[in-house]
Each structure stands twice: as C-alpha cells, then as structure tokens.
Amino acid sequence: MEDKQIFKAWMAELDFDTRGGIAKAAKALGKDRRTIERYIEGASLSKETRLAMTAIAQNLSPWDPQTEGLPAVHFSLSIGGKQKKA
C-alpha cells in the first residue's frame, strides 16, 4: 500500500477527512497544514510519522515515565498466548 493510501485511510479513520480535518491532523501530528497536504498528495511518510499516526489512532499520549504513554483507561487480556482487545 502506498503512503498516500495509508495516510488517506488514517485521515478517514479519525474523521480528519471532513471539514477542518487537515487542521486537526496537523495539530495532532505537530505538523503544519502544508505538510499534511503533501501527505495527502503522496509525499513519503517517515517511520516517526507513521508511529505518531498509530499512537494518535490508539489514543496514546506522548511517553513519560509516569504514564508510559498509555491512555487513562486501557485494558488488555492474554489467553493462551493470544492477545485480545476488549
């Protein structure tokens, strides 16, 4: 999958493909509006940007020693070596 498709899918998943979405995406990623427009047009995504996109989609906050970046409420369950999300 091309970076352009990946970015557009991320934008749609977070409802950033609606009115005002470019500004919201820019703020969430710490980028300027033009950079977001370049990603939409097909500019290459860095590993750091893709990791930030994942963190934002998972509602994670920037890492710090107290929270380890986890959301205020999180849950994980492991049974028989398989991990399930609830």
Image (spheres, rainbow, N blue to C red):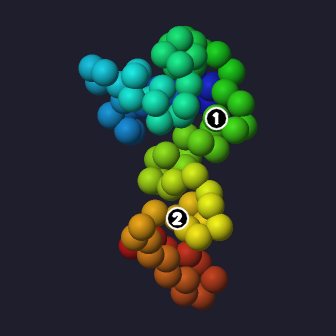
Q: Position of residue 2 (x, y in %)?
A: 63, 25
Sequence-first disc among 2 and 1? 1
Mark 1 crowd level (few <14, some 14–19, many ≥20, 10 Å Cα): some
Q: Position of residue 41 (x, y in %)?
A: 55, 11
Q: Is residue 32 left or right of residue 86?
A: right
**Badge 2 vs badge 1, beta-carbon distance below 8 Å:** no
Q: CA distance from mark 2 to mark 1?
A: 18 Å
Looking at the rendered structure, the kind of residue marked 2 is Leu
Instruction: Report the disc number at residue 49.
Output: 1
Image quarter for residue 80?
bottom right
**Number of disc labels:** 2
Up-down: is 20 above or below 85? above
Query: Which residue occupies the foreground of this view, 74 or 65?
Result: 65
Looking at the rendered structure, the kind of residue marked 1 is Thr
Instruction: Report the disc number at residue 70.
Output: 2
Q: Quadrant of the N terminus?
A: top right
Up-down: is 45 above or below 82? above
In the structure shown, which secondary structural element does the residue marked by tag 2 occupy? loop
Q: What residue is shown at x 53% (from left), y 34% (from top)?
A: 29
Residue ranking furthest to the right = 47
Query: Which residue occupies the foreground of this view, 7 or 32?
Result: 32
In the structure shown, which secondary structural element does the residue marked by tag 1 occupy? helix
Q: What residue is shown at x 68% (from left), y 21% (from top)?
A: 44
Q: What residue is shown at x 56% (from left), y 25% (from top)?
A: 31
Note whether residue 66 is visible. Answer: yes
Q: Position of residue 74 (x, y in %)?
A: 44, 71
Q: What residue is shown at x 42% (from left), y 67% (from top)?
A: 72
Q: Position of residue 13 (x, y in %)?
A: 39, 39
